[in-house]
Image (cartoon, rainbow, N blue to C red):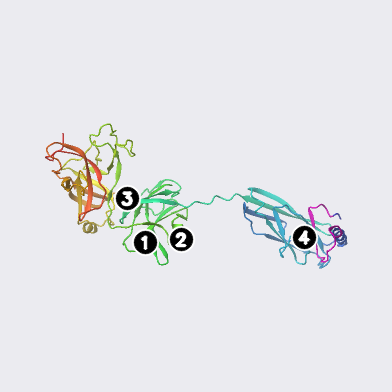
Amino acid sequence: MQMGTAHSSVFTTRKRFVQPVLTVAVLLVCMASSLPADVTATLSSSSLEFKMLSGQWPESQRVNITFSVNYDNDSTFRVHSPPEWLQLTHGLGLPAYSWILTQPYYIDVRPRGDKLSTAGEYRTKIIVELGSGKLYDIAVSVIVATPPPTPLRPEIKAITNAAYFAVAGFAPNSLMTIYGERLAESVISAEMLPLPKKLRDTEVFFCRRTGSGRSCSAMDLVFVSPTQINFLLKYSYIDAAPAGIAVVNRGLWDSAAALSSSSFTPISLNWISPGVFAAGYDCPLNGRDVPCEFTQARMDGGQVLRGTITDSDYRLITSNNPAKPGGIYVAWLTGLGNDGRVDDIKERLAGLRLRIGLRPPEEDLGSVADAVLMYAGASRDFPGLYQINFQIPPAVGWASGACVSGSAEIWLTLFGYTISYGIPVPLRASAEGEGCR
């Protein structure tokens, strides 16, 4: 029997090979020729299949070899050398094509991840040859898949009140906005009430720090997109424990929440933190060289932001529909800080005042008048939405003589403290409190 090329190796139970390689080869040929021709081998498997990600080594698979006659010292066989991307080892951890075997015979087969970096299917055969000349094939198939990209976690950039984009002092039952990246896979809005706690694969959690980590509860969702989430913040008490927000998308916690079992993006809480919803941009009343078309985005540097304040016909107050002294209007807002119970809101807002002036009250108290507060409470239209019905005083008291047309501002104060940002309101009035004609 010919030894074959350099791509073949010989296995035997002989243990006294110290001569040069050529002498060893001759001896093995003689041994192989002495093996009875009727000796056969049984392989536990004739085919092996592997599936692996490129660059990773899968678990090895074992093939047991059993001879029909137990020749402890004379049985010989050889395995033709495999390709470099396939590793063959014996249970002792030695290369299968270079050791002296003892029973039981077996070969561990394993693809080499360091040699299979390109996706595709690789096929080869392991040829086992008995000393009697009989050949046995083990078919090997390796499918290498390109590993999927490591999924990126959601990233929270900012958390604000959904109405006026403040970043602190969030009240319970407030509509909130999260800005970030990878917050959702697509744009989805809640289609009915009650609001869902999950939209597609996105969830928002309100969390508190605990002694063992964090305790989180799911929030109601209004809208989700890859860069923005609108949700309803709910909690029932304020204590010294840190609180915050976490986002989960496709089962992955956001990068801040993933840092540890007690981490999240922190927020501050307040029982009341109202804000009138921003409606869009408008020109100043009697503004010159500024386009007066109402727009959602600022189209001109001279435009001013308008709050969502409507008249009794639910028409938005703009420069083309300005407020007037004596008129009754509705401010639409969030953050009045309760869950909508009428008795609760009356108690909490006992000191609420709605003030109207040409300047912030801290600058010129003489230019401020209290509006007549007719109603303040939760709206039936949507969770987290509140309305304040008010009347502008017939005599605002800040003009003398001439007809005044300009931009007033509205603030909410609670027991003397300003609790909301100024909302510009176009106001057309005269010294006598009559609307300008």
Label 2 crowding class (10 Å Cα cut-off): few <14, some 14-19, many 20+? few
Measured from the top left, where is residue 20 in percent x and y? 85, 60
Image: magenta residue range: 3-23
Residue 416 seen: yes
Specify whether residue 72 is painted magenta.
no
Q: Secondary structure at mark 2?
A: loop
**Residue marked by disc 4:** 98
Q: Is residue 19 magenta?
A: yes
Amino acid tagged 2: Ser
Type of the residue with mark 1: Pro
Location of the C terminus (image quadrant)? top left
Q: Earlier in the sequence, mark 4 or mark 3?
A: 4
Q: What numbered label is drawn on residue 75?
A: none
Badge 1 or badge 3: first in the primary sequence: 3
Image-based side of 251 in relation to 354, left or right = right
The structure residue drawn at horizontal position 33% and vertical position 38%, both measured from the top left corner, is 298
- Marks 3 & 2, CB-CB < 8 Å contact: no
Question: Are the residues tagged 4 and 2 within 8 Å (C-beta)?
Answer: no
Name the element at disc 1.
loop
